Image (cartoon, rainbow, N blue to C red):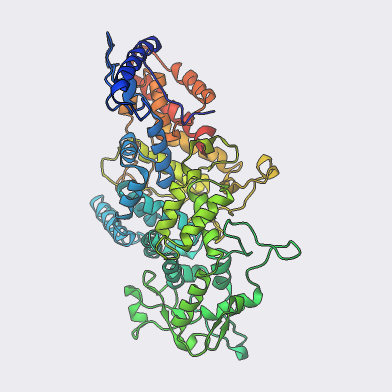
């Protein structure tokens, strides 16, 4: 099924044949004086003059060679823009195609957006003002909490240009997991700050990101090293081991030693070699002690007239400020870490943490460990060992001797032949199940919207409850899905992983269908939880698509370019065509709207779309 590479030629074949004969003759004549070194067609026609005895409408002779009827570049750009972002409309796709993928990535590296910690209070002020204008009281209005963070997140996703940064931030959020399935759901500023940290470091160095993760109050509370005390044997108190375990298992080195290609190293008996044991966890736990609040929430200052201290409750802490080290509560003495590495006695707690993070960062596992997980979030579920090795090499050395450069990793992932080559899409083991939240984002970013109040306040919980997937919505620190998850059935039988299949089940599957039905047919792109007095539902504006709805093939082709990157199969096309062509009646033009919505719905629930190749 070669869909992506197939060119679509709408001109009359016989006329094309006659023009080709003329072109071929002209080429021979020109070739006598000046041999043509390039192939002809698809825009490669420099020095070639095309003439014809006649032309019909816009089918001018030059179109035979200039590539105007070929969609393969648009399809490839559409696919790339979903991998590197969340898709886009035809104008945005063409812009990426014209710029070139590497140039687009470099341009994205220069773009920034308004921090969530600044956007969140702006939205809260808009809500307060709108409520007052509607005669509503703000006295008992709760927030900012997770739903208000969602408003800020969706506003950023829908309005800012640095889409690559936010795609990488999402990928990192599913690696360095915190979740609103905990008390942190109540702390909108803290969630915003944690997300800003991911976005800031998305194009930075992984070591710097790890260090900031250690000190972030949201992570420290979620993985319980906030107010983690030194040992006190008389009181049977020992350092909490939770973060110490997860920074190794989930954030850096994993459970077993790895080769650069991501495969497990084996001992003399053919068994995998553990990277750490329980004693190692206990030693790392000593490192992450003594951290507590650096600042107090303004409303809590009356309870802490002398400022924060070790033991300050998280409810009173400023959850946007990096934690402070209280050395009196930090475990003293040497710490014996991995492979004989020892943190010396007599250092400050901050020095201990810096050495421990650097020690993990330098471990040879980190490159392949991180490479596989980022490839899985952006490109495919089952990257080849060679692909992992190439990306891990970019982590080890960005070309200038720098380790951990995420920019180098991003370019290596997105520009690798395994990500770009069309032939790879034909293999059964390639691709991935599109993450559900990403499908919703693509749909609303690809189509015009009616948004009279210019607000993008998506409550987020509708998507999370329907699909099991939304930013910071993971059920546990192990994310929504494990990287090696194998659903029972044909995939597990041939040893293939499909992480996203973990949340695709008898509940979320039908609910995704229903969500698409409600969004598309009931025209609710999304809604906030603020009520019509304050906000209004965002709807689709399908006018442009309705204008071409009379031509079912053109409508399907247009949606194929935007949503499925040229991957619609003949069977799916036929099913959609049959369904929409029945929608045609003479008494009004409503059939145009119905055709567009039916085509959209059938594409969004089709295997051709749901499986990203």
Image position, residue 373 (x, y; %) = 53, 55
> Where 48 sits versus 288, above or below?
above
**Is residue 310 depicted above or below 188 in this figure?**
below
Residue 456 in view (yes/no):
no
Residue 283 drawn above or below residue 447: below
Q: Position of residue 247 (x, y in %)?
A: 54, 68
Q: Residue at x 70, y 43 (%)?
A: 493
Residue 17 in view of the camera: yes
Q: Which residue is the extreme one toward the front?
A: 33
Which residue is at the front of the view, 175 or 602?
A: 175
Residue 594: percent from left, percent from top: 40, 24
**Drawn side of residue 217 relative to residue 137, left or right:** right
Q: Position of residue 381 (x, y in %)?
A: 56, 47
Quadrant where the image shows the N terminus: top right
Judge left or right: residue 328 versus residue 255.
left
Q: How many labels sit on residues?
A: 0
């Amino acid at each position: 099924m070669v869909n992506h590479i197939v060119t679509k030629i709408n001109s009359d074949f016989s006329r094309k044949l006659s023009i080709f004969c003329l072109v071929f003759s002209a080429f021979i004549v020109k070739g006598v004086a000046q041999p043509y070194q390039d192939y002809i067609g698809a825009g490669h026609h420099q020095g070639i003059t095309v003439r014809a005895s006649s032309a019909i409408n816009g089918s001018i002779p030059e179109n035979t060679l200039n590539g105007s009827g070929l969609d393969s570049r648009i399809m490839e750009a559409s696919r790339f823009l979903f991998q590197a972002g969340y898709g886009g409309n035809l104008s945005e796709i063409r812009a990426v195609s014209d710029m070139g993928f590497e140039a687009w990535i470099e341009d994205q590296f220069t773009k920034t957006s308004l921090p969530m910690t600044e956007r969140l209070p702006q939205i809260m002020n808009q809500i307060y003002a709108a409520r007052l204008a509607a005669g509503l009281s703000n006295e008992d209005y709760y927030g900012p909490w997770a739903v208000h963070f969602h408003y800020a997140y969706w506003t950023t996703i829908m309005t800012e240009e640095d889409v690559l940064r936010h795609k990488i931030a999402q990928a990192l959020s599913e690696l360095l997991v915190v979740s609103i399935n905990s008390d942190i759901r109540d702390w909108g500023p803290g969630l915003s700050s944690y997300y800003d940290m991911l976005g800031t470091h998305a194009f930075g160095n992984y070591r710097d990101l790890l260090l900031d993760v250690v000190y972030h109050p949201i992570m420290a509370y979620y993985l319980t090293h906030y107010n983690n005390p030194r040992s006190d044997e008389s009181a049977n108190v020992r350092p909490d081991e939770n973060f110490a375990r997860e920074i190794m298992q989930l954030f850096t080195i994993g459970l077993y030693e790895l080769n650069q290609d991501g495969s497990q190293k084996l001992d003399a008996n053919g068994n995998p070699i553990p990277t750490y044991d329980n004693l190692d966890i206990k030693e790392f736990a000593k490192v992450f002690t003594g951290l507590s609040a650096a600042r107090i929430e303004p409303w809590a200052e009356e309870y802490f007239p002398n400022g924060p201290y070790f033991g300050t409750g998280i409810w009173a802490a400023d959850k946007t400020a990096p934690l402070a080290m209280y050395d009196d509560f930090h475990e003293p003495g040497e710490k014996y870490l991995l492979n004989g590495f020892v943190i010396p006695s007599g250092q400050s707690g901050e020095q201990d943490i810096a050495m421990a993070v650097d020690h993990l960062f330098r471990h040879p596992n980190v490159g392949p460990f991180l490479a596989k997980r980022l490839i899985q979030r952006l490109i495919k579920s089952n990257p080849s060992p060679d692909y992992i090795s190439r990306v891990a090499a970019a982590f080890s050395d960005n070309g200038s001797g720098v380790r951990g450069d995420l920019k180098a990793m991003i370019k290596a992932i997105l520009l690798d032949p395994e990500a770009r080559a069309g032939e790879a899409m034909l293999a059964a083991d390639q691709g991935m199940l599109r993450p559900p939240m990403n499908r919703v984002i693509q749909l609303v970013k690809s189509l015009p919207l009616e948004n009279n109040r210019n607000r993008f306040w998506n409550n987020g919980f509708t998507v999370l409850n329907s699909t099991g997937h939304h930013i910071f919505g993971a059920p546990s620190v192990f994310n929504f899905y494990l990287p090696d998850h194998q659903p029972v059935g044909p995939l597990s039988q041939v040893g293939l992983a499909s992480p996203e299949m973990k949340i695709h089940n008898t509940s979320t599957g039908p609910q995704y269908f229903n969500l698409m039905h409600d969004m598309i047919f009931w025209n609710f792109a999304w809604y906030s939880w603020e009520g019509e007095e304050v906000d209004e539902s965002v709807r689709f504006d399908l006018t442009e698509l309705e204008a071409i709805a009379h031509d079912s093939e053109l409508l399907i082709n247009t949606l194929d370019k935007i949503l499925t990157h040229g991957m619609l199969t003949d069977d799916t096309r036929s099913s959609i065509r049959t369904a929409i062509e029945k929608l045609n009646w003479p008494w009004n033009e409503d059939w145009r709207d119905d055709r567009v919505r039916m085509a959209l719905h059938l594409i969004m629930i089709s295997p051709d779309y749901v499986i990203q190749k």
